[in-house]
Image (cartoon, rainbow, N blue to C red):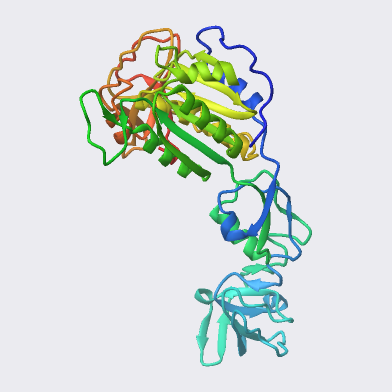
Amino acid sequence: MTNINDCFNNAHQTPLLTVEQTLEQIKNAIEPIKSTDKQMIRDALGQTLAENVISDINVPPHRNSAMDGYAINSEILASAEPITLAVVGTAFAGTPFQGKVSVNECVRIMTGAMMPQDCDTVIMQEDAQRSDDLIRISNQHLKAQNVRHPGEDIEKGAVVLHAGKQISPADLGLLSSIGVSEVTTYRKPKIAFFSTGDELKSLGQTLQAGDIYDSNRYTLYGMLKKMDVELLDLGVIADDKTLIKETLENAANSADMILTSGGASVGEADYVSEILQESGKVNFWKIAMKPGKPLAFGSINQTPYFGLPGNPVSVMATCYLFVQPAISRLKGLDDSQQLSLKAKCIHSLKKVAGRTDFQRGILKQTATGELIVDTTGLQGSHILTSMSVANCFIVIPQDSGNVEAGETVEVLPFNGII
């Protein structure tokens, strides 16, 4: 269970918060997880470092060649052309050349091989003419060319990765390059989620008149899975006040965050809203956005809670815009803005001023490098196919009206969680 700041004391808010105001209130309310785990680096992929990682070695640890070629002593470059050198041995990566090398001699060397003690420069094999055990080179080369020096990438004692960094595949290679096999990370958040509604049926059940299949739980599962959290799928909970209350309280005792879809408005059968007002500290917001105007947010027994809308596109939009940054904050990740791009809209878009629209779009790059975006078609909050074919949101500002074909618009590319 994760504590949440005690700043949600009112049951209702001023209508039509902006998206920015909503994000700010959520950010201020979420406390990052402080408990940590020590684990092998492969298991730490996607998690957040809790401590700085400091290198105990130089990388590379010794002088080595950046090319296949010939290691020489650069003093010979002061000679007149042509320069002829005798090849006295070979240095392989992992098998250094151990002998002495005079100024008139050279060593055949492979990429990554340790430089011979008497050599300081590498001539690329393409720049040398070899005949038997002799090579001929020009004097138009620079001292220390094609040589990697100790600590050139990482110096001993340097901070390689800082606390708050989400561990990437590149970081696994970086950690292994300095011999680190274990790191300390913040514990992975556990997210509980369920759907509410007597009309919802799970896969495998037969639909009766008025029933629909529960799609929200599956889209939330997919999005949360991409966020690398521990999942607690509580299924579909019927519109029963006692059952919903029991489910919410149990989830609050075992999870770091709770998500529900549907039931968090003010309808006659929306027991979630009644329970939250009795047992939680929750705001019921109306956000100046489309889709996803209604949103409940707060806490149940100090566990952060999101009550997402019931329409499938609204669920995904609010999860993308609000739940994703909230989970990042739980993880202790450094603040980062979602990538925003500008693109030319190739078709006109309908828009009524008053709310920020997040229309579904298809972003492409032309052969000349220009970014263009097209609509997916119908934009209703129930049109789940619009999310399936889209790869971005087209963001139309709150006070704007229709968008004409050819206008430049802002787009938010889906970042892999949709």
Quadrant that contains the N terminus: top right
Q: Can residue 39 be seen in this view?
A: yes
Residue 151 point in image, percent of width and height: 72, 63
Residue 75 lies left or right of residue 248; in this view the side is right
Q: Nearer the viewer, residue 163 or 347?
A: 163
Task: Quadrant for residue 304, please give it.
Answer: top right
Residue 173 lies left or right of residue 151; in this view the side is left
Residue 202 point in image, percent of width and height: 32, 37
Residue displayed at 68% across by 25% down: 5
Task: Quadrant for residue 368, please give it.
Answer: top left
Residue 105 point in image, percent of width and height: 66, 87
Q: Which of 61 and 49 is in front in this view?
A: 49
Picture layout, residue 68 above or below residue 406? below
Residue displayed at 69% across by 65% down: 59
**Furthest-right residue in this view:** 157
User: How many numbered badges does the structure rendering display?
Assistant: 0
Residue displayed at 30% across by 17% down: 349
Residue 99 point in image, percent of width and height: 71, 90
Quadrant that contains the C terminus: top left
Residue displayed at 36% across by 33% down: 370
Q: Is residue 21 visible?
A: no
Q: Nearer the viewer, residue 403 or 47?
A: 47
Picture layout, residue 359 above or below residue 413? above
**Furthest-left residue in this view:** 209
Task: Quadrant for residue 79, please give it.
Answer: bottom right
**Furthest-front residue in this view:** 242
Picture layout, residue 254 above or below residue 157? above
